[in-house]
Image (tube, rainbow, N blue to C red):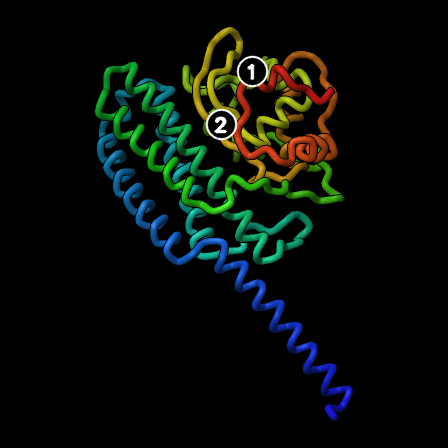
């Protein structure tokens, strides 16, 4: 008969082995070696085309319109941030720490990192597509084609990331308080690259967020846009914009989303009720199964108030 103490230790070891095996299975099943290799080949091709694009811009940026110069500069910064996210995903990194220094379980961390990288791919798709449109209007067909090619490559890579069509949870901290966060800094870090440092938009490519009914109306509208993204035509201040805005659900916590939106609402004329972390969580819960971007017409047809 095995002594009770030894049996207890053996059972504990067995349980530990089972837990570790489950973690490893979850990790290996997220992206197979073949999937990783295919994605890396696609990424290497994109990087090659990106370097060709930079070479074509070299020495000509001073001749570009100011709004296109701004997008070119922001595009490079965004590419650098996207590259970090891509490398973390490929390395099976844990992603970021949750608020309050609470780390996600390993399997969930890899899944969340995949969603974060997918959001970056979508953001780069939108950026290059807008730059392609601007070059097209200027009659610069070659530059338009190069930017459009990169947009298409990001779209193909996004389809290679597993589970992006599966709903994901938004990071949440029970003690989170949007009022304690710096909404202006969060806006600068996450939104200014497309909407301008003053939130007044960039040319005909990206719409302004100041004096925008999409920010000051029903609370759920801007929350849903940040949670799930926006695609297609949208009218802002009488002008029509066309493009892709990515989701920020994996990159921002509920409190951070609320903080950014409260900062932007404060830049608009008038007084508007503050958006709370609970507001964001409730909207996320109401649309927990949604995995695709909203359209302007969908946002207008449905409200939560």
Residue beneath disc 1: 297
In the rendered image, the quadrant that contains the N terminus is bottom right
Q: Are dots 1 and 2 in contact, CB under 8 Å?
A: no
> Residue at image x 47%, y 43%?
117
Where, by quadrant of the figure, is residue 132 drawn?
top left
Specify whether 45 is left or right of 269: left
Q: Position of residue 222 (x, y in %)?
A: 62, 24
Using the numbered discs, state the Cα–Cα distance from disc 1 to disc 2 in whole angstroms.
15 Å
Specify whether 26 is left or right of 15: left
> Residue at image x 54%, y 59%?
26
Q: Position of residue 240 (x, y in %)?
A: 46, 11
Total numbered badges shown on the rendered structure: 2
- For the residues carrying marks 1 and 2, which lies nearer the camera in this image? 1
User: Quick one: which residue is furthest to the top in this view?
Assistant: 238
The circle drawn on residue 104 is none
Q: Position of residue 278 (x, y in %)?
A: 74, 34
Number of other residues with Cα within 10 Å of mark 1, as a class: few under 14, some 14 to 19, many 20 or more: few
Q: Secondary structure at mark 1?
A: helix
Q: Secondary structure at mark 2?
A: strand
> Residue at image x 45%, y 33%?
123
User: Quick one: which residue is furthest to the right in this view?
Assistant: 4
In the rendered image, the quadrant that contains the C terminus is top right
Q: Is the residue 96 above or below the residue 278 in the image?
A: below
Of the two numbered discs 1 and 2 on the same chain, state the one appearing first in sequence. 2
Residue beneath disc 2: 245
Toward the viewer: 179 or 152? 152
């Amino acid at each position: 008969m095995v002594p009770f103490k030894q049996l207890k230790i053996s059972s504990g070891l067995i349980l530990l082995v089972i837990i570790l095996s489950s973690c490893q299975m979850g990790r290996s099943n997220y992206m197979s070696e073949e999937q990783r290799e295919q994605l890396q080949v696609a990424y290497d091709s994109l990087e090659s085309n990106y370097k060709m694009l930079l070479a074509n811009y070299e020495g000509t940026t001073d001749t570009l319109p100011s709004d296109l110069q701004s997008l070119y500069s922001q595009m490079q910064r965004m590419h650098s941030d996207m590259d970090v996210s891509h490398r973390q995903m490929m390395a099976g990194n844990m992603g970021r720490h949750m608020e309050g220094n609470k780390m996600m379980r390993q399997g969930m961390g890899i899944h969340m990192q995949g969603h974060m990288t997918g959001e970056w791919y979508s953001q780069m798709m939108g950026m290059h597509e807008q730059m392609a449109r601007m070059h097209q209007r200027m009659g610069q067909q070659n530059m338009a084609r190069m930017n459009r090619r990169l947009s298409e490559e990001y779209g193909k890579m996004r389809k290679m990331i597993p589970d992006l069509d599966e709903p994901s949870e938004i990071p949440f901290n029970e003690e989170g308080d949007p009022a304690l966060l710096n909404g202006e800094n969060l806006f600068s870090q996450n939104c200014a690259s497309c909407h301008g440092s003053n939130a007044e938009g960039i040319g005909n490519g990206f719409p302004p967020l100041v004096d925008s009914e999409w920010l000051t109306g029903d609370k759920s509208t801007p929350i849903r846009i940040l949670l799930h993204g926006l695609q297609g035509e949208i009218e802002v201040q009488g002008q029509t914009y066309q493009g892709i805005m990515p989701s920020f659900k994996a990159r921002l916590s509920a409190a951070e989303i609320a903080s950014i939106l409260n900062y932007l609402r404060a830049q608009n004329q008038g007084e508007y009720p503050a958006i709370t972390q609970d507001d964001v969580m409730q909207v996320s819960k109401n649309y927990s199964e949604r995995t695709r971007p909203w359209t302007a017409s969908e946002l207008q047809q449905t409200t939560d108030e």
